Image: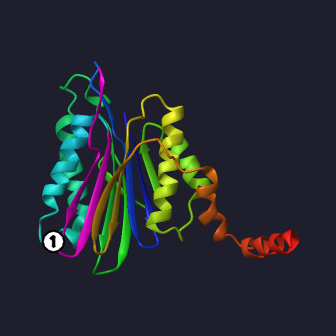
Amino acid sequence: MTLICGIQCSDGLLLAADREETDGIGKFSAQKIHEFSGREFQLGLAGAGDSSLADKAVLRIVASAGAEKFRAEHEQIIETELRQIYATYVWDERIPESDERGISLIVGLCDTVSRQNLLYCSVDEILWMRTGFACAGCGEMLGSYLLERFYTPQLAIAEATVLMRFVLSEVKSSVAAVGGQSEILALTASGASRALAGDDGVPRLADVLAPFWRTKPGAVKIAGRKARVSK
């Protein structure tokens, strides 16, 4: 199983996932996030759920991203691909255990024309636009809980990376099916960058809280008051 997350940042988008995969026999590391660089957009996709089906859906969408109309019509194109996947592999009652093949996708698109950083989460074949952040997959409730507490729209990608590494580490320590390295993809108008991180040197809670409190009303006054008291 997999936890996938997406964050809207002040300077782009951040997608993250754990890399642990199981095949019924053992565990191995697998890529969960894919990307596509278009002429006027940057696209990132992360998949959770039935791994073979999630990979198939993501790769079909990446292939469709090369169409000239993708930037303007990406919602319809992605939903069409998801609908075909579900109709073929999930909704067909003739396939044994087909109802256990559900998947979830998180999609991030940096549109350089409209200068929008768009974030979506899929619900079956429907693409659902999200504001702020989104989590899906195993450990979704804990990941959403932590992001609800510590996320702020003013976070830059560098700060959001610290937060996401902390969230993934906490979920890994609490949910047995989430593990391995953390895979992080940053999307900006100028391109995409990818990083892998282990659980050594995981950010402290204080590192996560620093940018969070800096944006809260009264935080500057409180900091100034503490400085005067210390003198």
Residue 141 visible somewhere in the drawing: no
- Residue 175 on image: x %, y %: 49, 32
| Residue drawn 24% across the image and 72% down it | 41
* Secondary element at tag 1: loop
Outermost residue toward the front in this view? 231
**Depth order, front residue of 59/93:** 59
Quadrant in the rendering for residue 110: bottom left
Residue 203 visible somewhere in the drawing: yes
For the record, the magenta segment spans: 26-48
- Can you say whether 34 is above or below 1 in the image? below
Does 196 lie within the magenta span? Answer: no
| Residue drawn 82% across the image and 69% down it | 226
- Residue 71 on image: x %, y %: 22, 71
Quadrant in the rendering for residue 92: top left
- Residue 144 on image: x %, y %: 53, 48
Q: Quadrant of the N terminus?
A: top left
Q: Quadrant of the C terminus?
A: bottom right
Please state which amino acid type lies under the numbered disc 1.
Lys
CA neighbours of label 1 inside 10 A, class few (<14), some (14 to 19), many (20+) = few
Residue that badge 1 annotates: 69
Does 32 lie within the magenta span? Answer: yes
Quadrant in the rendering for residue 88: top left
